[in-house]
């Protein structure tokens, strides 16, 4: 039997069960709203969103590795590309781009052109400083930590 090669984000996204995008977006918004109500401090909400994402990421990496068929990445640049092109497509249905690399190749930006988490979102002035999508930073940090990559994600 021939070895199974890595699958593209599109192929994986089309083959897995998924929840309705509007339901997902509105549920996430309700979680953020409840955190704002309960914690009453934007900085604490940012920390909580990051921690929630981290907890998701440490579990999500198993599904990613099992379903994507990717092999070990050789460096951080390849890892960032895999997250942007396969990971985001697989779990959110969007493709991201990687840019703004530093000279050492240890720092970059992952840009989502179409972020499904921000559909239907209007933040009031009282939410200045809220990193609404901070959960995504936590997911990336948690997933990378599980494959022995210590990172700072902001």
Image (spheres, rainbow, N blue to C red):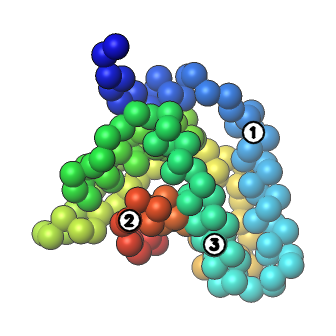
Q: Of residues 149 and 88, which is closer to you in this image? A: 149
Identify the image quadrant of residue 13. Answer: top right
Q: Position of residue 135 (x, y in %)?
A: 61, 63
Q: Of marks 3 and 2, which one's residue comes earlier in the chain?
A: 3
Against 98, residue 106 (above or below) is below
Residue at 78 percent across and 48 percent down: it is 26
Label 2: few (<14), some (14–19) or many (≥20) C-alpha neighbours in 10 Å: few
Q: Which mark is residue 7?
A: none
Say which element carries label 2. loop
Q: Position of residue 117 (x, y in %)?
A: 64, 50
Mark in the foreground, 2 or 1? 2
Q: Position of residue 113 (x, y in %)?
A: 45, 46
Looking at the rendered image, the quarter that the N terminus falls into is top left
Against 86, residue 142 (above or below) is below
Farthest residue toward the front? 1
Q: CA distance from mark 1 to mark 3?
A: 24 Å
Residue at 74 percent across and 33 percent down: it is 20
Against 83, residue 154 (above or below) is below
> On the image, numbered disc 2 is attached to which residue?
148
Identify the image quadrant of residue 7. Answer: top left
Q: Of marks 1 and 3, which one's residue comes earlier in the chain?
A: 1
Residue at 38 percent across and 71 percent down: it is 151
Say which element carries label 3. helix
- In this picture, residue 119 sits left or right of residue 88: right
Label 3: few (<14), some (14–19) or many (≥20) C-alpha neighbours in 10 Å: some
């Amino acid at each position: 039997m021939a070895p199974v090669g890595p699958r593209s984000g599109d192929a994986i996204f089309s083959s897995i069960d998924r929840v309705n995008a509007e339901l997902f977006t509105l549920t996430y918004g309700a979680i953020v709203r409840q955190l704002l109500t309960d914690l009453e401090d934007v900085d604490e909400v940012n920390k909580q969103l990051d921690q929630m994402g981290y907890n998701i990421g440490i579990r999500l990496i198993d599904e990613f590795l099992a379903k994507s068929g990717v092999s070990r990445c050789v460096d951080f640049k390849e890892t960032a590309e895999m997250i942007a092109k396969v990971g985001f497509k697989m779990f959110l249905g969007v493709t991201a781009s990687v840019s703004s690399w530093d000279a050492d190749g240890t720092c970059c930006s992952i840009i989502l052109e179409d972020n499904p988490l921000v559909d239907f979102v209007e933040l009031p002035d009282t939410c200045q400083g809220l990193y609404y999508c901070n959960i995504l930073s936590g997911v990336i940090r948690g997933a990378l930590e599980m494959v022995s990559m210590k990172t700072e994600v902001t």
